[in-house]
Image (cartoon, helix red, strand yellow):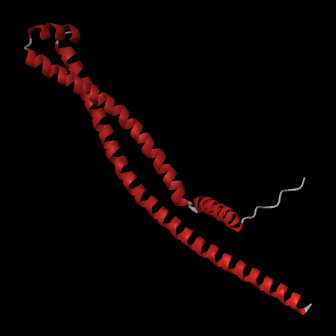
Amino acid sequence: MSRTLRIAKDLALAMINATLILIAVCLFLGLRLSDRVGAIANEFAAGLVELDGMRSEVSDLRQEVADLRADLAETRSTVQARLGGVSIDNLVASVRSEMAPEQIALMADVNERLERIDALGGKIDTMTEAIDEAAAGARSIAADPVPVAEALAGALVGDLTDTAVRIAGCAPAPASG
């Protein structure tokens, strides 16, 4: 009987030792995870600085496009006023018939560039919206990285549990119902 008692005592000590080792490993992994979350938060903060710089550049570009559009509209109205109400399209058609091919090509190039400026304005608007959304998401994560850390820790613990179950070759007992 004493031998059985000693075996049971040794098994209990072995389980306690294994549990303590697992706790130590989990604490170590938790520490590594918290360090990684801190590094990710710092990277987000650096990214926010870059996003703010991009936002100001995009804002400057947007303002330049708006200024170009305003200048174009002003020039068009000035020309219209100087022509005394003559349609600009009619005037362009009559001038175009008298222009050299090089001048027509130059005019087509100018029109193409104006179309690109209009397209660029739409792309800048889309880019600004995307930057704003990314900055808002990054700020929320940087302000409170705990939910991200909890999600990562939950995934890590789930993966560790699955791995331990596979290694041990056992599965949880089926729920009785």
Whole-percent x, y for residue 86 in the image: 20, 8
Q: Quadrant of residue 166?
A: bottom right
Q: Which of these two is toward me, 117 or 15?
A: 15
Q: Is residue 52 left or right of residue 84?
A: right
Q: Is residue 146 visible?
A: yes
Relative to 152, does residue 128 appear above or below in the rendering? Answer: above
At 33% from the left and 33% from the top, the residue drawn is 121
Q: Is residue 69 visible?
A: no
Relative to 104, does residue 44 appear above or below in the rendering? Answer: below
Q: Quadrant of the N terminus?
A: bottom right
Q: Quadrant of residue 124?
A: top left
Q: Which of these two is toward me, 86 or 110?
A: 110
Q: Is residue 114 left or right of residue 144?
A: left
Relative to 84, does residue 1 appear above or below in the rendering? Answer: below
Q: Is residue 12 left or right of residue 2?
A: left
Q: Is residue 138 left or right of residue 161?
A: left
